[in-house]
Amino acid sequence: MITLPLYLFCLGLELVHVLMRFLVAYGIARVLGVAEDPAAWIAGGVAFLPLVLSLATYFFRLPGGWGLFWELGARRPSQREKEAVNSVINELRRRGAKTPTTWFVIDDPVPNAQTLGRTIYINRGMIGHPSLDATLAHECGHIATRTGDRLLALVRLELAGLRVTRVYLETEGWMITAKVLRVVSGGVSWELPIIRALWAAYLRRAEHAGDRYANRLGYSYELVEYLDVYERPLDGATPFRRGRSHPYAEQRIGRLLG
């Protein structure tokens, strides 16, 4: 499968950022009075930590992602939200689905959801929505096919604490400072144009896989209705599929009905 060689290629490119993190961490440790050998060990740990976490996520499904919780503006669900969603998750589990280890809410009125690792982030507008069952069945497909793990592994190529700081700086408009910080924090490899296009192609296939998973669980027509009402009207032509991580909704509908 192309995903593993592509992922390993990204790891190789990240070695540039590993070197930068080592030099910065070693310099800080020495300024603080740490001896040479301990400083080198500390700097090595800081430098390679993102790669270790990423590899553990890709191959061993390492859970977590609290930095993403804050970055996405997510929150824990209320009691009534738990009741609405957990009943659906329990039904999916009864049908044999690979259900999330946890889920959070994003206060967005648009009915949608996304998966990172084995965590599903559900927009507030999806809770109580008629398409909640089909949407969660699709997201469980991303868990079962490990798409969520691969995405989280890519995110973890960037040093977690610096990633949160970098995203905050970008939201505040400090773009130059954020770009300088990115040299040390890493995670740039999979955002390079050609590599990003290859990952986008993989994600488009993963969407079809998620749809097939929902179909096997018995939610094909509910998912078709959701796609037809909420996603197809928003579709627009994307030359060369540039940056497009989802197939056109009509293509997804066609496969589900076919």
Image: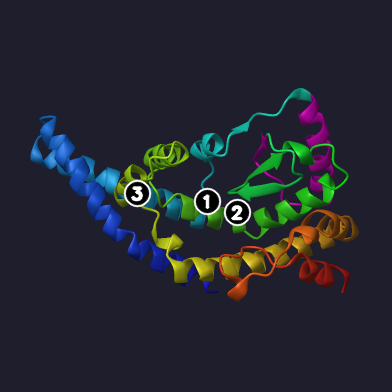
Q: Nearer the viewer, residue 64 or 203?
A: 203
Q: Amino acid at mark 1?
A: Leu
Instruction: Bin the neighbour count of mark 2 within 10 Å (Cα to Cα): few under 14, some 14-19, many 20 and up.
Output: many
Q: Is residue 228 magenta?
A: no
Task: Let me know if residue 53 appears in the view.
Answer: yes
- In which quarter of the view is residue 169 placed? top left
Real-space Cα separation, disc 1 to disc 2, in angstroms: 6 Å
Give the farthest residue toward the front: 173
Residue picked out by circle 3:
179
Q: Amino acid at mark 3?
A: Lys
Q: Which mark is residue 148?
A: 2
In the displayed structure, would residue 203 be above or below residue 175? below
**Residue drawn at x 70%, y 38% as measured from the top left:** 108
Q: Is residue 90 magenta?
A: yes
Left or right of residue 95: residue 15:
left
Q: Which residues are magenta?
A: 80-106
- Residue 210 rendering spot, x and y as whole percentages: 72, 61
Residue picked out by circle 1:
152
- Residue 157 rendering spot, x and y as whole percentages: 41, 52
Q: Amino acid at mark 2?
A: Gly
Task: Let me know if residue 94 appears in the view.
Answer: no
Query: Nearer the viewer's eye, disc 3 or disc 1?
Result: 3
Real-space Cα separation, disc 3 to disc 1, in angstroms: 21 Å
Instruction: Assign a secondary structure to mark 3.
Output: helix
Q: Quadrant of the C terminus?
A: bottom right
